[in-house]
Image (cartoon, helix red, strand yellow):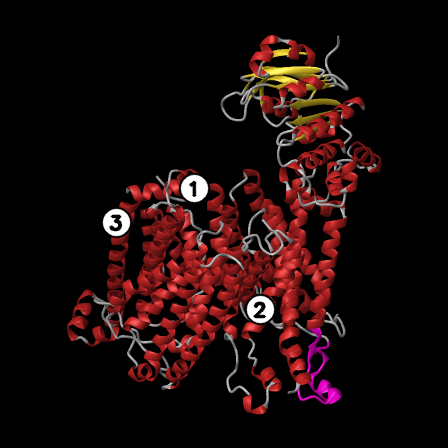
Amino acid sequence: MFAGVALLFVATGVFQSWNLSLQILIIGVLSSIMALGVNMQWGYAGLFSTGIMGSVALGGLAVVLVSGQPVPEGWAAGGPRLLIALAFGVLVIAAAVYLYNRLAAGTARRTAMILLLGAGFFAYRAILDPAVTAIEAFNPATAGNIGGLGLPSIVAWPVGALFAAAAAWAIGKVALGLRSDYLAIATLGIAEIILAVMKNEDWLARGVKNIIDLPRPWPVPYEVDLQADPAFVAQAANWGFTSVEASTILVKLLYLAVFGAVLLVLIFFSERALNSPWGRMMRAIRDNEVSSAAMGKNIKSRHLQVFIIGSAVVGLAGAMLTSMEGQLTPSNYTPLRFTFLIWVMVIVGGSGNNWGAVLGGLLLGWLWLIVENAGPVAMGYLTMPLPDGVLKAHLIEAAPHLRLITLGAVLLLVLRFSPKGLLPEK
Amino acid sequence: MGEPFLIGDAMTGGYGASDILHGCTIAVEKGEIAVIVGPNGAGKSTAMKAVFGMLNLRGGSVRLGGEDISKLSPQARVRKGMGFVPQTSNIFTTMTVEENLEMGAFIRTDEIADTMAQVYDLFPILKQKRHQAAGELSGGQRQQVAVGRALMTQPQVLMLDEPTAGVSPIVMDELFDRIIEVARTGISILMVEQNARQALEIADKGYVLVQGANRFTGTGAELLANPDVRRSFLGG
Amino acid sequence: MDILNALVAFLNFVFIPGLAYGSQLALGALALTLVYAVLRFSNFAHGDTMAFGTMWVILITWALQSAGITGGVLPTALIALPFGIAITCAFVLATDRAVYRFYRTQKAAPIILVIVSTGIMFVMNGLTRVIIGPAEQDFADGARMILAPNDFKAWSGLAEGLALKQTTLITVIVAAICVAALFWFLQSTRTGKSMRAYSDNEDLALLSGINPERVVAITWIIATALAVIAGTLYGLDKSYRPFIYFQLLLPMAAAAVVGGLGSPLGAIAGGFIIAFSEVFVTYAWKKIVTYLVSADMAPDRLLQLLSTDYKFAVSFAILILVLLVMPTGIFKGK
């Protein structure tokens, strides 16, 4: 199976370009990591969450906050006040939860909740709004945000995982007790909200104005630096490459090595976890909740646990993706790409099987990008006989969207004829 | 004596790999009441479901009026004149009593008003509550709706799976009275009952099943008089 | 104090938009809830069914326009609507035949059907993008305004204008007709009752001789028709963009759940609850409050609880609240 996928990448290298092939492979590796996380939620525990995109986006946000350029003026303008506001918000919610659990159900509790949350919301906005105005006022053309810590990119990755985990904890607390399809709807909504926050709260990460120039993770160098390095240019020439070619390929290989290493470490631990008593218990709960509950397993807390871990893995991949792209573009996060595509990877690869998730990630990552790249070319051949005109132009222009249809068809075919996926669970 | 109107003859079968019924025979004559009793897990309900075609038979056959209907689906058997009242979920709870009866007559294309009037005559309380949601009725009234629904197809045989499960003794007596009335109109009744003694009292024919096979067969009175039956199944 | 102006502003900016949006959501939620009631899964392809169907309405509208056929003062899309519904129904019935039926006979778990519906979602989304593209389309024609703000100002002498777009009025009227027709169908026709019976108790419906495949097909047809109508009304009233339609899945699902999944009445109530909550929370109340309080107390801030971009948060918050407090919704669903 993996050899077959490797062949696809080699073929892409030979027939298209090695640069493209590597590019797809890197995205494939990142997708595989996300698929691993989703596989933990669905494959191990049977949780259908459609909020994957939210975890990815939170990972990206972590990169901005940790390794983005500091904006001391912005921070000075309103940073502390902002923190106070956020802390206050958390406090209000904590107080509400505390009261909810302490008071007996009834009108008194309902009134108390409404008063507390209502007053809390306005007080929160009263503290927050001036801080936001102050921060966003500073140099809005290039900054207007609180800035990052300026730390190395790699530090941001675990923070990304942490962000996603924290969000998953909050979501899980609320939504995990729900029936499966309610959970799906609820998580879909949360992901949209996370994205809405990132798009609109300019103080946080400049919203849709995007953050650029995020540093690359160690040890990946910049192409321009390589090209400026005489030793490198000489070496490249030695191997018969131009320095541009050689530098882009080298950079990609390094990314691949770093991401690949992370993937391997994750797989190692996933495999250990899956085959440990913990993993067996998870699968037992998935296969029969009623009898597991009867045997004294605390299903809700187990589900919460695996939900958090899975989301953290996805958040990690999200952080890695953003630090590779070097910029955070909230409008790039779409549920089709970052939620449902990952789902297709897991299901096609084989739910419950870690290697299946990796296979699915590589295979569908390839399919997704190759149809985007090759689709218009293929459509060009297909429409050869057609006269030039609006229809032909439209078809060629629309060809990248064919990948959606392709993926849908792949998902439906796999579900129907091989519901356990390409690499079934052992 | 000719063949009974409805007979499940030497039925063998079950839901999964293992058989629950072993050569079990159940029959009912026109206008008579036949009752299946027996201990828990004896396959009483299974035997009735087998007669109605809800499980595959590995052996034996089911014949209605001399015609072999073993291969027909339950829906097709309804069309042949069999009515079935399941033990649970036997009404449409969100629909009114009248709509329940209408749905019972879904396969009919002729006028159903007369049949509905007959059902209301039989169960006057239903006429009173005909615009109420069936789910809001009491247990006994719900059973009446369930029986009424099955009668709407004007069946020749009415099969009842533990019609008195979970209702009070008074309601049970009333239900049995109604069932006797139904039988008097010429409809054969085949029912499974937990309340063996009361059921055998109104039965023309009784079947005592044990482990999916016939143990005792006779008229209701015979079985009630049989000391073995009394000792083992009727509590002395 | 200027209660009249405040009232007009309230009608113009809160009530009328809420009413139109609520009608659109209610129709969409009805479709979602019907599919849930009969087929027992939450259809993730619902938003894309709307997008797909509305696309055909738009294409046919263009074709009609270029053939010189228009609806006069009414939008041409209303003429195109039945054709759009027919095409989409054919497609949806084909997917049922080719995909869903297999899982129905297997009695697959609802979550499997949800995942299957995401597959259908991908396909429909892709088809929509290939055929019409992801961009925004405007297909409204006919008379735009029934009541223009300036005319109203001139007539009433108030400072605030009241606008009534034709599409808003059409939305409300069409929605009312659809709802009335649907309830008549469910309550008074044999087929409608058999649908309710099947939704209530599948096994007993089978025993009663109700043909499940027929019930399922009719459910798909009604749900698809409602979805295409809702999509077309939304597109006429606001604008058409496939991705927005996909996102509408959330408020529609919230509306259906809030009302009680599987309950048609609940879906309508839920649609309006969600719509009005969204408008209430995201509307900047400064203008209305300024009319109501004395000049020196006039607010200097917008008085907007949340920016409009957070409207999803509103549907979501209501959804979660309802699920936690009364999991079966306002009108007991399943």
Could you say whether the residue bearing mark 3 is in a helix, strand or loop? helix
> Which comes sooner in the sequence, label 3 or label 1?
3
Please tell me which residue is depicted at 72% across the width and 55% down the height of the picture.
Answer: C182
Give coordinates of residue A97: x percent, y percent.
Answer: 42, 61
| Residue type at the position of mark 3 | Phe
Displayed quadrant of residue A89: bottom left
**Crowd class of label 3 (few under 14; some 14 to 19; many from 20; radius 10 Å):** few
Task: Read off the residue under disc 2.
Answer: C277
Does the residue at mark 2 contact the one at mark 3 (Cβ under 8 Å)? no
Quarter of the image containing the C terminus of chain A? Answer: top left
Q: Is residue A377 at all visible to an observer of this figure?
A: no
Count up the numbered dots: 3
Task: Read off the residue under disc 3.
Answer: A268
| Residue type at the position of mark 1 | Glu
**Crowd class of label 1 (few under 14; some 14 to 19; many from 20; radius 10 Å):** some
Q: In the figure, C221 relative to C201: above or below?
A: below
Q: Nearer the viewer, mark 3 or mark 1?
A: 1
Quarter of the image containing the N terminus of chain A? Answer: top left
